[in-house]
Amino acid sequence: MQLLLFNAFNGLIQGVFYALMALGLALILSLNSVINMAHGGFLVIGAYLAFTLSPYLGFWGALIVGPIGAAILGLLVERVLIRPLYKRPDPLYTLLLTFGLALVIEDLTRTIWGAQGLPFQVPAALNSPISTVLFFITGYRLLVVAITIVAMLALYLLLRHTRLGIRIRAGTLDLETVSALGVNIYLLRALNFGLGCLLAGLAGVLAAGILGLTPPMGSSLVMPSFVAIIVGGVGSLIGSILGGLLIGVAAGITTTYYPAASEAVIYLIMLIVLVIRPRGLLGQEGLFE
Amino acid sequence: MIRRHGVEIALWIALLTVPLWLTYVGGYSALGSKILIYGLAALALNLVLGFTGGLSFGHAAYFGIGAYGAGMTLKYLVASTPLAILVGTVAGGLAATLLGPLVMRRRGIYFAMITIAIGQLFYFIAVRWNEVTGGEDGLAGFRRQPIHFGNLVYDVQDESKYFYLVLLCFAIGVVIMRVLLASPLGHTWVAIRENRRRAQFLGIRTDLYVWAAFAISGTLTALAGTLNAMLFNFTSPQDLHWILSGNFVIMIVLGGMRKFWGPLVGVTIFVVAQDYLSSVTDNWMTAIGMLFVLIVLLFPKGILGLIARRGREMRAAVTGGRVATERATATIQSPPAPLEQEMK
């Protein structure tokens, strides 16, 4: 029973990372119409940046600087590489471009920081378990959950109550009309892309404290995030979060009974959802059909 | 006849004589086979990608299923090359046929995302089902077997004899695809690519046609996969990985996805470049990634697309007059050429 709880909680933490990634991906997907294959790359950048800067800034400073670094890189990539492609309606090109970018980022990370995994130091105070029975619930893990909840609430408030957020939401429905109303949609899409990368960077720093740093950490987290979006339903941010948590916990629970299937189960859930409810748990009907 | 099919006849003659000249240009037999195998897979994927307009980003799955199917047949069932090809192809084709309904109603981004994710399922099965698939290390311990015709033996263990087996399968695949593309089925695919909604309004069950494209494409890709496994007498989870799927797509775009032979051109360049880059630099992944970015930004229509455009401009220059307007309107969103030209 304790083992099951342990694995389920591990899965939940994984699911939190999937959810953060999926949220950023879904934002970029709906407004920029880009499947950001390099999303894992931005996660890796955030994580390694935090790792490199934490001796100077401390853990908390790195926690802030890492995601911001990823967001700045995201803005740069959007401006230089992705913006010229908006005029091509076929999503194939941005998909291939970000795919190439993912390869470049992973390979350069390996060259700069080495292929070996690196440990990311979190404050000692956070590393001790909360209780002896629930030994797997450390302060850091609770912090991960707390920060994620805060980030999601902040995103909710941003999208609901700020001018930028309202424009982003309007843009996902009808970008042309938003543009006709005088909004600079180039800037809007750039900021939205940066926002997505910020979330990826945050997921990277948080994940580094638990999983450690390896160059392929990004690509191993990005695929389940796609599944999270499909399961949760394209076009629904809450769906993406739900999907991420769901597959994370499902993978964790599977680890208890049949470890070899812990990855495959994620994709099986996706197949089942696609058969029973093709639009995903909370997806809008008819979108992308 | 010669004028219309000149290039194509030259291509087939060049392919038939590959073992004679390949070593002189710095290649080796296995490289020739590899290009044909990847070429077959890319041409097959292009049925969905270039002709039906479905953004399949998970075709490595069917390639890999074919490869594992052939490898496991040779290792566990019977020592027969033709049977290995058959089993692998049927297995991959079956997978594509069964999974097709999950994507056939989707468009664009969503089609791509689902195909990517489905591909990962098979990757993890190959990685985790150690006892049968060999896990991360890949499946080894099988060899392609000589083929017997009564008393005659064709020993494909010889590299150049194997090349001709690959060429035969490639040719069969090409003939099937050409016949299909020239048939009403193929024309319907192109119609769906050009305007799906309009095709629906004409009463065409577009989802069934997309399904057919996906299933046929997956089957032929699996055929390529079986040949690949037997080329190296080895297959690994890398043959199922999404990076391979992405490579297939970029090869097609590099060559030109709106031309039948485009993918083969792209494959040749890509495979040779990859072969070369991995021998000169450790950072070949960066180089390949940059290649992706450059191709997307600079050659979105691919090499054959570029050549065709040049050709049109030159002919227009000869006949005079129309060149200026044609140039001005030749942007990426320009309306595609009529069907007849597209199919070439």
Image (spheres, rainbow, N blue to C red):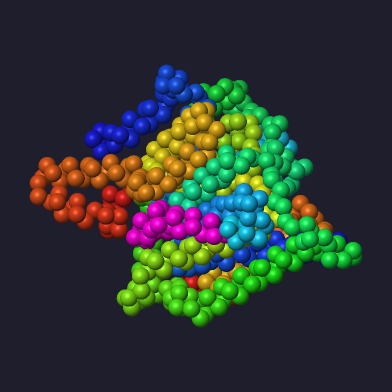
Main SS category, magenta section: helix
**Along the line of sight, the residue nearer the viewer: A50 or B133:** A50
Does the magenta run of residues contain B206?
A: no
Does the magenta run of residues contain A89?
A: yes
Residue A126 seen anywhere in this rendered image of the structure: yes
What segment is highlighted magenta in the picture? Answer: A67-94
Residue farthest to the front, as pictured: A56
Is A205 on the left-hand or right-hand side of A84? right
Image coordinates for residue A51, horizontal then vertical, percent: 64, 51
The residue located at (27%, 57%) in the rendering is: B334
The quarter holding residue B325 reads bottom left
Residue B81 seen anywhere in this rendered image of the structure: no
Image coordinates for residue B26, horizontal then vertical, percent: 45, 21
**Along the line of sight, the residue nearer the viewer: A211 or A88:** A211
The quadrant of the image that shows the N terminus of chain A is bottom right
**Along the line of sight, the residue nearer the viewer: B95 or B324:** B324
The residue located at (40%, 75%) in the rendering is: A174
The residue located at (52%, 75%) in the rendering is: A158
**Along the line of sight, the residue nearer the viewer: A172 or A253:** A172
Image coordinates for residue B339, horizontal then vertical, percent: 30, 54
Image coordinates for residue B162, horizontal then vertical, percent: 54, 27
- Relative to A235, is B237 above or below? above
- Relative to B192, is B321 above or below? above
The quarter holding residue B159 reads top right
Residue farthest to the bottom, as pictured: A161
Is A188 on the left-hand or right-hand side of B225? left
